[in-house]
Amino acid sequence: MTARELDAAGITDPALRAAYTRCRALNARHGKTYFLATRLLPVARRPAVHALYGFARWADDIVDDLVSRAGPAERGAALDALRTRLATGLRTGTSDDPVVRALAHTAAGYGIDHRHFTDFMASMRSDLEVTDYATYEDLRAYMHGSAAVIGLQMLPVLGTVVPRAEAAPHAAALGVAFQLTNFLRDVGEDLERGRVYLPRDLLAAHGVDRELLEWSRATGVHDRRIVAALRAAAGLTLGVYREAAPGLAILDPVSRPCIRTACVLYGGILDAIAADDYRVVHRRSAVPRRRRAAVAVDGLGRVAAARLRDRTGRARGPEPDEVSGPAPAHRGAFAREGAV
């Protein structure tokens, strides 16, 4: 966390500044795509985003750290302890745990509904017990707590030009779209954790089951049935991005470049997966650094334009170039007439 960001947010207490700095480090280490996009937000809003994502990464580390030798019982105990600290922190507005302290401060400052954090912790707990999902509906129920609520937590920080309730469904859908993208990218790593997030019925429609995925992972053999199933999962993910797309135009204009950039970068992950012929069972696909840099530069231009309009008092509704803009490389994700 830079001193400039903390100063702009009015965070002066040394312990609280250290807490936010810890959250920023967690976000930078684990969430490179969204961390890059966050740097396009107004300076004063960035600490809150780092607190929200830093806490999410902290909880996720307890559940998913492949380096740790802790078993399910130990991880469950650690997660339960964190849930207790979270409940106390949200109630009192502070905590001895620096990550929870920053989160509690952000939740109080932005009036974030505490139920979003409760639902998030419930989904994290289920990761220790549930290893796959029979249907997409079952998976969506899990993703409400693991992803949709992250979008809902973010809304008060980003700001909207309409009542928040109108923007909420789109924000929730975007959280789900981002997580579905991650599920596709991380198929192989999730197998190592003993989990398959892609629904069994979707996989079965293409002749795929857990045993075939594990065989492919172990042998390195590229199976066309798996490719077909992953392509179908990518199509499903693009549909959720389309649900989310109208939400961009109703965000505060100064926040739109951040979210647009995140959308384009995540869409780039789908591009990279397709370009690699869906070999994510064997290796993680990544957006080329040059592509990430180009998207970031485009985002900086949009930031400058949005801030100029904000200072000069122009209409705060959607601007034509912000709503359509250059289509992402994966044109199926957001058409030109969509919000991204």
Image (cartoon, rainbow, N blue to C red):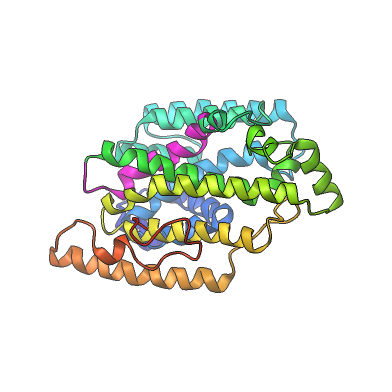
Q: Position of residue 280 (x, y in %)?
A: 70, 53
Q: Quadrant of residue 339?
A: bottom left
Is residue 105 visible in the rendered image? The answer is no
Count of all numbered marks drawn on residues in the image: 0
Residue 213 visible in the picture: yes
Hey, which residue is sitting farthest right in the picture? 219
Q: Magenta residues?
A: 141-162
Give the position of the N terminus as an image quadrant: bottom left
Q: Quadrant of the C terminus?
A: bottom left
Q: In terms of depth relative to the viewer, which is nearer, 172 or 15?
A: 172
Q: Which residue: 30% across, 60% down?
A: 323
The residue at 69%/35% (across/down) is 204
Q: Nearer the viewer, residue 317 or 74?
A: 317
Q: Position of residue 3 (x, y in %)?
A: 39, 61
Q: From this view, report whether residue 292 is shown above or below residue 54.
A: below
Q: Main secondary structure of the magenta part?
A: helix
Q: Residue at x 50, y 41 (%)?
A: 55
Q: What's the residue at 83%, 44% (across, down)?
A: 215
Can you say whether 337 is above or below 96 in the image?
A: below
In the rendered image, residue 183 lying in the magenta stretch gets the answer no
Q: Position of residue 320 (x, y in %)?
A: 25, 64
**Horizontal side, residue 282 vs residue 14: left or right:** right
Q: Quadrant of residue 94?
A: top left
Residue 144 highlighted magenta (yes or no) = yes
In the foreground, 333 or 55 = 333
